[in-house]
Every structure is written in structure tokens, then in C-alpha cells.
Image (cartoon, rainbow, N blue to C red):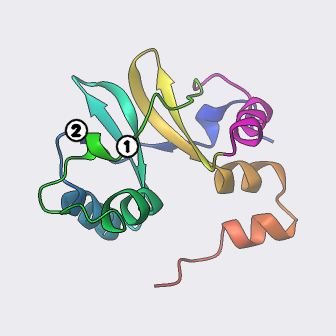
Amino acid sequence: MSTSIEGIMTRHPVLLRDDATVAETARMMRDHDIGDVLVTRYDKMAGLVTDRDITIRAVAAGLDPQTTPLVAILSPDPVCVAPSDEPAYALALMRSHALRRLPVCDGDRVVGIVSLGDLTGATDTAGALAEISTAPANH
């Protein structure tokens, strides 16, 4: 198992400003084959938006994706981990907050993101969860 989050996190996650639109965000998710984006305000972490947030908080609520800014649908004040934190700590946070992803922050600066799949692959390399987590995307 890696000794720190820094060794397993995804570096350079997709970041969007909180005034980006829901439609722009959906295109970024499509183009980068991801299910979440980290949202910044004044270059500081403001929140997280997932594909589910777009579906439930925007589309199902009848908001116009072309004009609705991310600030209207984001999950604010996300739980974050530091690059030096241990994977077991991140797993405990995910479990206690029912999360699948955690931004990795060095102070106010976003430096990465770590997913349940990243942690599963790092901690359970032979198990079924690791196999599922490392499988190619189904488009």
C-alpha cells in the first residue's frame, strides 16, 4: 500500500470556476471521461460537482444548463485530504461521509483528487473491487 495520498492521487484534476455553466461542465466531463469536477472561487476550493449533481440538481429541477452556473448546484465545502495523509485516513473519511471522491488540497490549493477506485486499487490489489475499479470505462 502506498504510504501517502500523493502516491495514488490523480494530479491536475479538472478545475472549473464557480461561474462556469452546467452545460460547460457536462462537456468537460464528457471530453475528459470523468464524473466530477472540482469547483474554485477566487482560486480557492469552493466545492465539487458530480454527474449526479447535474442530473438531480439541474436537469431534474428544470434549470437551464446553458445559463445555470455551477455555484447553483455544487456541493460546497468539500471534505479534503492532504497529499501527506495516509490512504487509510482517506478511506475512513469516505466511509464516514459517504463519499466516493476527495479533493487533495495543500492548504487552499487543489493539487489532486483521490477516488474510492484509486484507494481500492492501492489497498486491495487482488480483490473484486480492485478489478472493477481498474476496468476500462463503458461508453
Q: Nearer the viewer, residue 15 or 94?
A: 94
Image quadrant occupied by the C terminus? bottom left
The furthest residue to the top: 107
- In reply to whether residue 88 is colored magenta, the answer given is yes
Q: Which residues are magenta?
A: 83-98
Say if 117 sits above or below 16 in the image: below
Percent coordinates x, y for residue 73 in the rendering: 34, 47
Label 1 sits on a secondary structure element that is loop
Percent coordinates x, y for residue 135 in the rendering: 64, 75
Residue labelled with disc 2: 17
Percent coordinates x, y for residue 13 in the rendering: 39, 45
The furthest residue to the front: 61
Q: Nearer the viewer, residue 84 or 44?
A: 44
Residue labelled with disc 1: 74
Label 1 packing within 10 angstroms: few (<14), some (14-19), many (20+) = many
The furthest residue to the bottom: 139
Q: Is residue 94 left or right of residue 17?
A: right
Which of the 4 quarters of the picture holds residue 58?
bottom left
Q: Earlier in the sequence, mark 2 or mark 1?
A: 2
Label 2 packing within 10 angstroms: few (<14), some (14-19), many (20+) = many
Residues marked 2 and 1 touching at CB (< 8 Å): no
